[in-house]
Image (cartoon, rainbow, N blue to C red):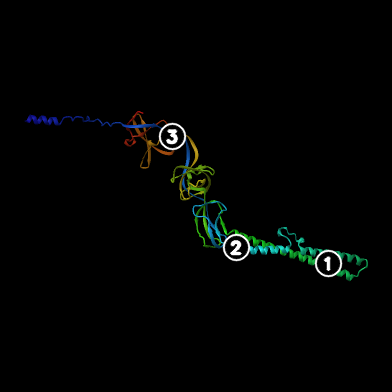
């Protein structure tokens, strides 16, 4: 029995089957991965920023006269053309005022003896012509009396009477000239009053000052509108204004006249082109960015004021940018890295990313063209891990 027990004890202290030899490290199996090469290719360099769309013109159309509203001819969402009638006011009072102003004007014109005061020549007014004829007659009589008096045929008193008559005629003629000028001024005043009445009559039709869309209405038929009172709101949405801030590090790359591409989350997959029209000469002291404004054509009305948008401006082309497949990028805790395969091991390389190029991204870091990077299987890797590239 003792021999059996000793034999069992000596067996328990022996080498376990399959155990690693003392002093030898455990061997990990290689991680199977797929790989691709870092390449170089021409890549457009862009300045990207965000902003929002707004109407180029947003107008509150007001009435120039006060009157009751007869008809409202448009409503919210309607497209209107410049000059189109939006609201018609009751014009009875203004029609009467216009008739009175016309009557007063034509009465004054008739006293001048012409059909249109613009053709007036003061010397051709009837009473001026009469005074001029009398003046000419008295002048001839005076000159004749002077000649006769010099020859002794008439007395000095007769000459004096002729001169007095001549002087009276001159004064009468001058007076009639002044009367004609005064009446002409009156006619001009009457014309201005008539034209004002005509304008007020036209103003009973409130017209669109621009083409655009109706964004709101403030009156209904029967409402009484005062002069200056808002009746309709219009917005011009073609083109739209895009405004966004460009970081100061990119300010030198953005210039007026450059093409800008706008993308909207409301219209995924679509791009809209426009041109930069204005750049602020000073930066925002809080964001250290410059305000940039662009006009975006919107003839189809697909874009709406208030939309948030992403914009990019082509600032140049990098002829040999390093690019790696997007699947090669590993992001963790705000750090982006790739695993570069050297021999049969994968090593971490921290990189920064740039523009997307199809399924690849522009990268910068301690990498070079031709390096082999892991594109699948990265989740099981760490720096120096053994890998086995799958055969393609």
**Residue 126's spot in the image, x, y percent?**
77, 63
First in sequence: mark 2 or mark 1?
Answer: 2
Q: Toward the viewer: 352 or 163?
A: 163
Mark 3 highlights which residue?
Answer: 322
Q: Which residue is mark 2?
A: 94
10 Å neighbourhood of mark 2: few (<14), some, or many (≥20)? many
Q: Is residue 24 left or right of 256 when viewed as pictured?
A: left
Q: Quadrant of residue 348?
A: top left
Q: How many marks?
A: 3
Disc on the earlier residue, 3 or 2: 2
Mark 3 to mark 2 CA distance (whole Å): 76 Å
SS under mark 1? helix
Viewer-nearest of discs 2 and 1: 2
- Which quadrant, please, contains the N terminus? top left
Left or right of 56? Residue 351 is left
In this view, the residue farthest toward the right is: 152
> Which quadrant of the figure has residue 175?
bottom right
The quarter of the image holding the C terminus is: top left
**Residue at figure coordinates x 77%, y 60% from the top left:** 124
Which one is closest to the eye, mark 3 or mark 1? 1
Kind of element beneath mark 2: helix
- Percent of width and height locating residue 213: 51, 52
Q: Is residue 381 left or right of residue 359?
A: left
Where in the figure is residue 323, as x and y percent of width and height?
Answer: 43, 35
Give the Cα distance between marks 3 and 1: 109 Å
Closest to the camera, between mark 3 and mark 2, is 2
């Amino acid at each position: 029995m003792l021999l059996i027990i000793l034999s069992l004890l000596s067996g328990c202290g022996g080498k376990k089957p399959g155990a690693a030899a003392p002093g030898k490290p455990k061997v990990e199996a290689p991680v199977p991965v797929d790989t691709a090469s870092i390449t170089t290719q021409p890549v457009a360099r862009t300045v990207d920023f965000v902003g929002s769309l707004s109407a180029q013109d947003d107008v509150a159309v007001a009435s120039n006269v006060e009157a009751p509203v007869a008809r409202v001819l448009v409503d919210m969402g309607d497209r209107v053309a410049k000059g189109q009638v939006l609201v018609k006011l009751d014009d009875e009072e203004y029609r009467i005022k216009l008739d009175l102003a016309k009557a007063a004007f034509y009465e004054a014109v008739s006293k001048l003896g012409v059909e249109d005061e613009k053709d007036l020549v003061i010397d051709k007014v009837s009473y001026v012509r009469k005074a001029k004829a009398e003046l000419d007659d008295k002048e001839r009589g005076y000159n004749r009396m002077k000649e006769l008096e010099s020859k002794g045929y008439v007395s000095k008193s007769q000459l004096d009477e002729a001169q007095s008559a001549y002087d009276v005629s001159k004064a009468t003629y001058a007076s009639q000239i002044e009367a004609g000028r005064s009446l002409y001024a009156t006619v001009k005043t009457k014309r201005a009053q008539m034209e004002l009445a005509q304008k007020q009559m036209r103003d009973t039709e409130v017209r669109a000052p621009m083409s655009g869309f109706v964004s709101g209405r403030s009156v209904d038929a029967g409402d009484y509108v005062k002069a200056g009172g808002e009746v309709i709101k219009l917005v011009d949405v073609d083109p739209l204004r895009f405004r966004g801030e460009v970081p100061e590090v990119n300010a030198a790359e953005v210039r007026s006249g450059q093409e800008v591409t706008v993308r909207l989350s409301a219209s995924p997959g679509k791009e809209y082109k426009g041109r930069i029209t204005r750049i602020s000469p000073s930066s925002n002291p809080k964001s250290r960015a410059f305000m940039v404004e662009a006009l975006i054509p919107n003839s189809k009305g697909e874009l709406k004021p208030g939309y948030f948008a992403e914009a990019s401006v082509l600032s140049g082309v990098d002829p040999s940018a390093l690019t790696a497949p997007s699947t090669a990028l590993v992001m963790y805790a705000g750090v982006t890295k790739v695993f570069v395969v050297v021999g049969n091991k994968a090593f971490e390389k921290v990189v920064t990313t740039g523009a997307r190029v199809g399924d690849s991204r522009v990268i910068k870091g301690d990498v070079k063209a031709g390096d082999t990077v892991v594109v699948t299987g990265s989740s099981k890797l760490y720096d120096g891990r053994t890998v086995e590239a799958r055969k393609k």
